[in-house]
Image: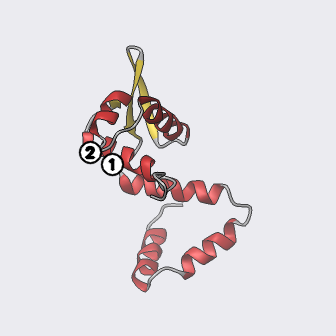
Amino acid sequence: MAGGRREAGALESAIMNVLQGAGDALTAAEVRRRLDERLAYSTVVTILSRMHDKGLLVRTKAGRAFRYAPVSDEPGLAAHRMHQVMNGRPDREAVLVRFVEALSGEDERRVRELLEGRET
């Protein structure tokens, strides 16, 4: 963190950790209390809203506020992010090729097993 500012995504990651560890949906005020730092309530609301807009969180109305929860566990969120990257690229095949080329032998073997086991 340079000059008191966070790296991009650091606050989002911290909030996701709080929500995943909670075991239940939380309001922005509850998320703010569980974070280990001083943040404005409006900052937490803004980040939660952006995460919801990205499809990372679900929210339900709770009185005048919303309760937020992750749409998936950590592996599911990582897969979601990978799909977002792929869907935003005009050179999708080139991205896939680079990804596959960078796989370890063990990861490549596992991907092959997963693909062979898929029903088409």
Closest to the observer, 39 or 113: 39
Question: Cα distance, mark 1 to mark 2?
Answer: 6 Å
Dot 2 amino acid type:
Gly
Picture quarter with the C terminus: bottom right
Find residue 118 and report its horizontal and vertical position in percent: 47, 64
96, 7: nearer the viewer: 7
The secondary element bearing badge 1 is classed as helix
Q: How crowded is mark 2: few (under 14 residues within 10 Å), some or many (20 or more)?
A: few
The quarter of the rendered structure image containing the N terminus is bottom left
Name the residue that disc number 1 marks: 17
At horizontal 68% and vertical 65% (from top left) the residue drawn is: 92
Tell me if 39 is positioned left or right of 35 in this view: right
The residue that label 2 is drawn on is 21
Residue type marked 1: Asn
Q: Which mark is residue 114?
A: none
Dot 1 and dot 2 residues touching (CB under 8 Å): yes
